Image (cartoon, rainbow, N blue to C red):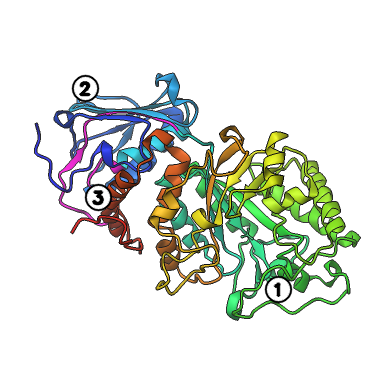
Amino acid sequence: MSVRTSAAASIADVVPAVVSGRSAPDADFQLTPSTTIVAAGAAEAAGTYLAEVLRPATGYPLPVVPRESPDGGIVLVLGGADPRVGAAGYQLVVDRRRVVLRAATAAGLFAGVQTLRQLLPATVESRQQQPGPWTVCGGEILDYPRFAHRGAMLDVARHFFTVEEVKRHIDLIAQYKINVLHLHLTDDQGWRLEITSWPRLATHGGGTQVGGGPGGYYTQREYQDLVAYAAARHVTIIPEIDIPGHSNAALSAYAELTCDGEAPPPFTTSGTAVGFSSLCVDNDSTYRFVDDVLEELSALTPGGRVHIGADEADVTPPEGYRKFVHRALAIAAGHGLEVTGWHEVLRADPPPATVVQYWGTSGVDNLVAAATARGTEIVLSPASRAYLDMKYHRGIPIGFKWAGFIDVDEAYNWDPGSFLRDVPESAVLGVEAPLWSETLTSRDDLDFMSFPRLPAIAELGWSPRSTHDRQDFARRLARHGARWTAQGVAFYPSTQIPWPA
Ligand code: ACM
């Protein structure tokens, strides 16, 4: 038996918890200067990603090679996994001679690579060379997700975040097997994506933010780079254009989208009012705008799904709202797009193919329950559990408290499969943790609000209900603080977690 130090990682510490795992401490694998990563064909990208993660701290060359040598190594194989892993899971076997990761798809291999990182000491996450030794905990894992949609949402409209900041965020969330990044690209305070047929959306509508700062926007080329970066990490970006409400930035750029023909000034106050703006649902130009925006967006969205918001359209007349939503859905379909909307979209009685994102707090919603009976699928983002912009407690200087304080316990201790009354688990596509940015201005703010709560939501999305155990989760999460420190993540040191001294 090898002696375990407190720095040793274990299968029992992986977040999200694995479906099944067995540690074998006498089967630990040592990374050495001569270790190779064996990955060929469609497995090569996951091998290259793994090598890039491990090289800085180990200082080892870790070449990615197509064939295994007699000395073993880390072997990534597409095919031959236990069929229970499905399309998104993986099987990992670590023994003294080799590490073998098998999956049916590149996404499964990528998920397995994220687990493998966690079987190495936390210092492997440093970008500077560290002393080692580099022991991979021995044993076997069979793992696959509970839900298909494991999302994080980032609001880049209230405050703008740069391409580099969003890429870093993608790398951090992908570690916890998050596979969707919903980008909230437009709101009253800002329009953040270049639309070439309506250029003032970005140049004027993107020119400010909450409190009147400089704002910013992504050119289509930058946005395509982000989408590709996310895709390489098996994260699908779902872009949100929030209409017909939350639209002051667009109205301010184009008077023809308003009913009175007068463009309002940019919304630059430090206040964070919502529900006061609407596209004019009776103007032809409104539908030309929707058509042009969705046409350009469809070319930028290989995932094929967009989010049309449709929340808090408080000043849109109810009949006009229904008409608008149906026309917008038809336009989206015409561009080959699938559509998600916040749960208010059900007031328009959309077809069941429209995915609905629930952001209420009570878990009781008759429209949602009735829609699921007709086949609608739900993404769960209950604000009292999953909103990462809620404060951890009253002493936190950033964030809101309208849906309550959310510490790790509140984020973790609920069940997506039974949260909504009269909604069966089979109607739940997954979970998503939104991070609204009215009060968030820096990369450290994103880190602080996301960690450690985002891993809690990620675990609810990935791990089987049978693994749900708040004490065990807290114990496992405690081991991740050292990883975040090594990565420079400014996490919140929740008093609910038994961090090592
Ligand atoms: C929302 O929080 N308005 C979706």
Residue at left offset 51%, top offset 36%: 147
Residue 47 visible in the shown view: no
| The CB of the residue at mark 1 lies under 8 Å from ligand 1 | no
SS of the residue under disc 3: helix
Give the quarter of the image for residue 259.
bottom right
Residue located beneath label 2 in the image: 70
SS of the residue under disc 1: loop
Looking at the rendered structure, the kind of residue marked 3 is: Ala
> Residue 122 — which label?
3
Q: Residues within 10 Å of mark 2 (few under 14, many from 20)?
A: few
Segment colored magenta: 118-144
Q: Is residue 236 left or right of residue 442?
A: right
Q: Give the mark, 1 or 2, whose residue is nearer the N terminus.
A: 2
Q: CA distance from mark 1 to mark 3?
A: 45 Å
Q: Give the mark, 1 or 3, whose residue is nearer the N terminus.
A: 3
Q: Residues within 10 Å of mark 1 (few under 14, many from 20)?
A: many
